[in-house]
Amino acid sequence: MKQYSILDLSPVPEGKTVADALANTVDLARAAEKAGYHRYWLAEHHNMPGIASAATSIVIGHVAAATRTMRVGAGGIMLPNYAPLVIAEQFGTLATLHPGRIDLGLGRAPGTDMATARALRRHMAGEDSFPNDVQELLAYLSGTSGGSGVQAIPGAGTNVPIWILGSSLYGAQMAAAFGQSWLGKFAQLG
């Protein structure tokens, strides 16, 4: 049996509000679940007046609370915008509240324009730390964060499924580096 998913940006219709967009997202998710969809993805975009999904993990929690069986996840969280511990705690909390239903897609782009990227990150590092950040996130979610003494609580031991956004060859290379097979637009890790 084929499984189908929806990717939703929570678009704000012309003449409507962000609240309207988020209500539409919940309505669409409920209809998708009723129609038998397997997964509902939400995407992170910032400083875009027509998109209401900037606080992606919060919207995921809202959609997961409004549905019962469908998996809900990020397609994706732009990991360079956050410390891996923060994402582990957010998605660990979601996985604790909605067991077996949360997925975490990761990307490495800023998810916005460069001025907004600077506002999100405050300091822009020159080196690409994405592979290390993914490894750190995996360690937090598995509960094996090493000798640092830092744990993601909640998060440790939740083993939230992680997917790498495959909008470029880089995503496929990352999946291969982690020993995972490429699954179209996303590659699953862990």
Image: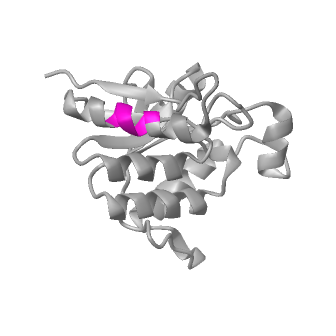
Residue 158 can be seen in this image: no
Name the residue located 44 percent from the left edge and 35 percent from the top edge: 25
Above or below, 111 against 77 in this view is above
Question: Based on the displayed image, in which of its 4 quarters is residue 126 positioned?
Answer: top right
Residue 103 locus on image (x, y percent):
39, 45
Name the residue located 78 percent from the left edge and 50 percent from the top edge: 121
- Left or right: 106 as drawn, with respect to 30: right
Above or below, 17 against 80 in this view is above
Residue 164 locus on image (x, y percent):
49, 35
- Left or right: 160 as drawn, with respect to 168: left
Q: Let me know if residue 28 is in the magenta part.
A: yes
Residue 95 locus on image (x, y percent):
36, 58
Q: Give the extent of the magenta segment.
A: 24-29
Of residues 125 and 50, the one drawn nearer to the viewer in this rendering: 50
Name the residue located 68 percent from the left edge and 34 percent from the top edge: 111
Q: Let me know if residue 21 is in the magenta part.
A: no
Above or below, 48 against 131 in this view is above
